[in-house]
Image (cartoon, rainbow, N blue to C red):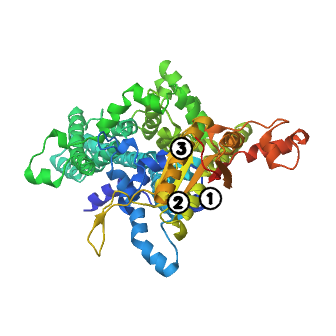
C-alpha cells in the first residue's frame, strides 16, 4: 500500500499555483468589455452561422437562415451550436416573463439578446486560460507571464467572446492540447518507472528480489489508452463543428499516439492498438451527431424509424457536404479567393502582432537548422515544445493551401503560440541591458496594438449595425406601428442580425381559441441587403419596392415605413440620386458613429468637398488640416434615412 501511494504521488499533479493580480484585472476587463456591449461587427458568420439559427428555433421567430443550413445540401452541424448557445437563449426564453413582471426588464431586446450569449461564451473562453495555465504548471513553465500576455490579446477580448464556430474550435483545441500534454507527462513518468524497474528486475540476484520488483511494477498505473474516449469525442465534435479541425487535431493526436514509442516498454503493437481504439471510441459520438443532423434537416423522421424503412438517403453527414462544397474552387470564388501567403504574411501579424512576427522568425530559424542537419538544436520530437510547435505550424501550413483565407480561421493557434513565445516579451536576470530594452519595447508594442485593435474590432468596425437594429426594434414594438409594413434597405454594410428584431414567425401555425381556425401571420418586416451595388442601381430597386408599397397602401390600406441605410461616405451620392425622383424625399432619422465599412471608404476632403460644406460652418477651402481630418473621421458613420412620399408617382 505504501509503495502504491508513493508511485501515484510521483506521477500526480502539483498543487495549484496562485495567479497574478494583473491577470485577474484583464479577466475582469474581458467581461466588462462584453457587457458594454461591443458594437463592433467582425463578420456576418458571427451571427448567421450560429446564434441566428438557434434563436429562430428556440424563440419561434422569423430569422435569416443562410444557404449553409439549406436542407437540400446542409454543410453545418446543428448540435454543437445548440450545445453552446442553447443554454443562454433558453435562459432568456424561460426567465423573460419573470424579469418583465418583477423587474420590468424585457430580455428579448437587442442588448440582452446580444450580451447574454456573449457572456456565456466569455465564461467558456476561460477554458482556454485554464488549459494554458495547466500546461505551464505541468511542465514547470512561467505561467504568470504567459497568462498575462494571453489575457491581454485582443483576440481573446473580441474573437473568443463571440459566437464564431472558430471560437468553439479554439476551446476544443485548447482542451485537446491539455489532455494530450497530461497524457504525455503521465506516460513519460510511468515509462521511466517501468524501465527502471525492468532494469532492476534483470539485474536482481535472487528470486525474492525479483518478486518484490515484479510486485512494484504491477502497481504502475495504465497509461497507453489514457483519455482515449475523451480525445476521440473532442475530435469528432470539433470536426462536425468545423471540418478544418482536422488540421488542428492532427499534431496533438499524432503526439498522443507516439507516446513512449522507441522505449523498451512501448512498441508498434501499442501504437496500432491506440489507433484502432481511438477510431472505435469516436464512432458513437459521430453516429449521434449524424443522427441529430439527419433529424433536424428532415432526412429521417419518426415514421421512418417506426416503419424501419431507412436507407442511405435518410442520413446526412454535414462535414462531408462541407468538404464537397469547399473542394470546388468555383464555390470558393463566391466568398473570395486569396493568395496562399495571406495567412503567414497578413493574418498572423494582424492577429498576433509582435508575437506573430517573432514566431515567424524563430520558426524560420528552426527550419534552417533542420535543412542544415543541426538536429541537436531542434526541440525533441516527443517533448511538450515539439507538440506546441507542430500544433502551431501544421494548422497554419495546411490552411494556407486553401485559396479562401480569413484571419479568424487561425485563431485557435493562439494557445500554442503564447506557450512557445509568450515568455519572450519578458526579460530575465541573465539577459543583458540591450536585450532587456528591446523586450520592454516589444511588450509595450504588444499592449498598444492590442488596445487599438480591441477598440477597432470591438466598437468601430461595422459599429453602426447594432444601434440601427436597436432603433428598428424599438420602432417595430411601438403599439401604434403594429401591423404596418416596414422596409429596411441596406447597402455597403453587413446584414442586420434578424433575431435581434424579434420578428413574429410567419411559418408557425396559430389557432384561434374561439373559432378553432388555424392561420399563419403574413410578413410585415422586409429586410433587403444589396451588398455593394452602385447607388443608381440601388435606387432603381427602391423605386420598384416603393411603387409596390404605395399600391398595397392604396388597395389594402397597408401603411408602411421605408428605411434606407448607407455609410455616411455615400451621403452626397445618395441624396443626389434620390433628388432625381420627384415623388419622394429622404429624411435623415439618425447617424450612427463610429461605423467603419471597407465597402465604402470615404475620401480625404479637398477644398471643395460637399460633405464638409454641409456639415460644418467653416467653408471647405478655409479649413485647416485638423478640421479636414475631423470632417474625414466624421464620415465613418452609418446614415439612416426614411423615405417620405410627397406626390403620386408619374409614369
Badge 3 or badge 2: first in the primary sequence: 3
Within 10 Å of the Cα at label 2, are there few (<14), some (14-19), or many (20+) other Cα atoms?
A: some
Which of discs 3 and 2 lies nearer the camera? The answer is 2
| Residues at marks 3 and 2, CA–CA distance in whole angstroms | 57 Å
Residue 596 in which image quadrant:
top right
Residue receiving disc 2: 559
- C-beta proximity under 8 Å, tags 3 and 2: no
Is 207 displayed left or right of 525 in the figure?
Answer: left
Query: Residue visible at 13% across and 53% down?
Result: 303
Name the outermost residue toward the right: 622
Residue 504 can be seen in this image: yes
Residue 316 in which image quadrant:
top left
The secondary element bearing badge 3 is classed as helix
The secondary element bearing badge 2 is classed as loop
Q: Relative to 37, does residue 388 appear above or below in the rendering?
A: above
| Residues at marks 3 and 1, CA–CA distance in whole angstroms | 17 Å
The dot on residue 22 is: 1
Residue 281: x %, y % from top left: 22, 46
Is 482 displayed left or right of 261 in the figure?
Answer: right
Query: Residue visible at 52% across and 70% down?
Result: 479
Residue receiving disc 3: 418
Amino acid at each position: 500500500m505504501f509503495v502504491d501511494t508513493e508511485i501515484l504521488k510521483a506521477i500526480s499533479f502539483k498543487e495549484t499555483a496562485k495567479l497574478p493580480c494583473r491577470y485577474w484585472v484583464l479577466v475582469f476587463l474581458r467581461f466588462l468589455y462584453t457587457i458594454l456591449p461591443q458594437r463592433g461587427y467582425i463578420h456576418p458568420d458571427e451571427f448567421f452561422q450560429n446564434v441566428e439559427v438557434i434563436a429562430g428555433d428556440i424563440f419561434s421567430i422569423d430569422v435569416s437562415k443562410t444557404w449553409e443550413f439549406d436542407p437540400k445540401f446542409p454543410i453545418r452541424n446543428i448540435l454543437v451550436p445548440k450545445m453552446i448557445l442553447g443554454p443562454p437563449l433558453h435562459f432568456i426564453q424561460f426567465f423573460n416573463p419573470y424579469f418583465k413582471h418583477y423587474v420590468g426588464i424585457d430580455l428579448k431586446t437587442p442588448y440582452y439578446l446580444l450580451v447574454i450569449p456573449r457572456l456565456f461564451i466569455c465564461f467558456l473562453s476561460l477554458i482556454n486560460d485554464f488549459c494554458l495555465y495547466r500546461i505551464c504548471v505541468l511542465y514547470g513553465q512561467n505561467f504568470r507571464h504567459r497568462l498575462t500576455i494571453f489575457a491581454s490579446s485582443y483576440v481573446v477580448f473580441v474573437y473568443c467572446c463571440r459566437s464564431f464556430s472558430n471560437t468553439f474550435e479554439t476551446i476544443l483545441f485548447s482542451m485537446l492540447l491539455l489532455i494530450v500534454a497530461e497524457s504525455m507527462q503521465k506516460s513519460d513518468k510511468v515509462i521511466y518507472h517501468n524501465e527502471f524497474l525492468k532494469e532492476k528486475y534483470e539485474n536482481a540476484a535472487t528470486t525474492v528480489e525479483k518478486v518484490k520488483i515484479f510486485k512494484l511494477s504491477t502497481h504502475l498505473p495504465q497509461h497507453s489508452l489514457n483519455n482515449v474516449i475523451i480525445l476521440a469525442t473532442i475530435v469528432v465534435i470539433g470536426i462536425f463543428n468545423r471540418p478544418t479541425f482536422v488540421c488542428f487535431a492532427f499534431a496533438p493526436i499524432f503526439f498522443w499516439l507516439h507516446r513512449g514509442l522507441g522505449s523498451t516498454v512501448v512498441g508498434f503493437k501499442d501504437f496500432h492498438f491506440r489507433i484502432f481504439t481511438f477510431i472505435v471510441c469516436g464512432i458513437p459520438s459521430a453516429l449521434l451527431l449524424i443522427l441529430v443532423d439527419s433529424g433536424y434537416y428532415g432526412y429521417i423522421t419518426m415514421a421512418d424509424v417506426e416503419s424501419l424503412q431507412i436507407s442511405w438517403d435518410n442520413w446526412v453527414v454535414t462535414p462531408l457536404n462541407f468538404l464537397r462544397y469547399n473542394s470546388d474552387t468555383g464555390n470558393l470564388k463566391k466568398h473570395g479567393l486569396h493568395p496562399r501567403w495571406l495567412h503567414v504574411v497578413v493574418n498572423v501579424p494582424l492577429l498576433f502582432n509582435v508575437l506573430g512576427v517573432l514566431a515567424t522568425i524563430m520558426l524560420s530559424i528552426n527550419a534552417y537548422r533542420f535543412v542544415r542537419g543541426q538536429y541537436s538544436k531542434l526541440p525533441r520530437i516527443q517533448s511538450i515544445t515539439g507538440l506546441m510547435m507542430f500544433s502551431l505550424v501544421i494548422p497554419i501550413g495546411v490552411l494556407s493551401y486553401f485559396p479562401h483565407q480569413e484571419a479568424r480561421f487561425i485563431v485557435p493557434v493562439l494557445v500554442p503560440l503564447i506557450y512557445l513565445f509568450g515568455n519572450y516579451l519578458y526579460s530575465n536576470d541573465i539577459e543583458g541591458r540591450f536585450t532587456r530594452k528591446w523586450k520592454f519595447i516589444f511588450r509595450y508594442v504588444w499592449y498598444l496594438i492590442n488596445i487599438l485593435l480591441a477598440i477597432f474590432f470591438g466598437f468601430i468596425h461595422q459599429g453602426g449595425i447594432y444601434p440601427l437594429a436597436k432603433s428598428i426594434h424599438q420602432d417595430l414594438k411601438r403599439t401604434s406601428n403594429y401591423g404596418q409594413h416596414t422596409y429596411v434597405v441596406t447597402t455597403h454594410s453587413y446584414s442586420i442580425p434578424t433575431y435581434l428584431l424579434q420578428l413574429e414567425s410567419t411559418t408557425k401555425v396559430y389557432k384561434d381559441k374561439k373559432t378553432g381556425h388555424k392561420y399563419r401571420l403574413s410578413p410585415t418586416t422586409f429586410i433587403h441587403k444589396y451588398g455593394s451595388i452602385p447607388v443608381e442601381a440601388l435606387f432603381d430597386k427602391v423605386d420598384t419596392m416603393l411603387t409596390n408599397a404605395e399600391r398595397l397602401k392604396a388597395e389594402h390600406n397597408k401603411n408602411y415605413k421605408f428605411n434606407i441605410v448607407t455609410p455616411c461616405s455615400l451621403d452626397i451620392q445618395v441624396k443626389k440620386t434620390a433628388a432625381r425622383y420627384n415623388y419622394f424625399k429622404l429624411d435623415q432619422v439618425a447617424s450612427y458613429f463610429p461605423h467603419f465599412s471597407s465597402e465604402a471608404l470615404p475620401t480625404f476632403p479637398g477644398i471643395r468637398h460637399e460633405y464638409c460644406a454641409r456639415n460644418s460652418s467653416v467653408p471647405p477651402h478655409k479649413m485647416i488640416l485638423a478640421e479636414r481630418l475631423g470632417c474625414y473621421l466624421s464620415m465613418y458613420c452609418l446614415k439612416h434615412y426614411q423615405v417620405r412620399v410627397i406626390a403620386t408617382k408619374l409614369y
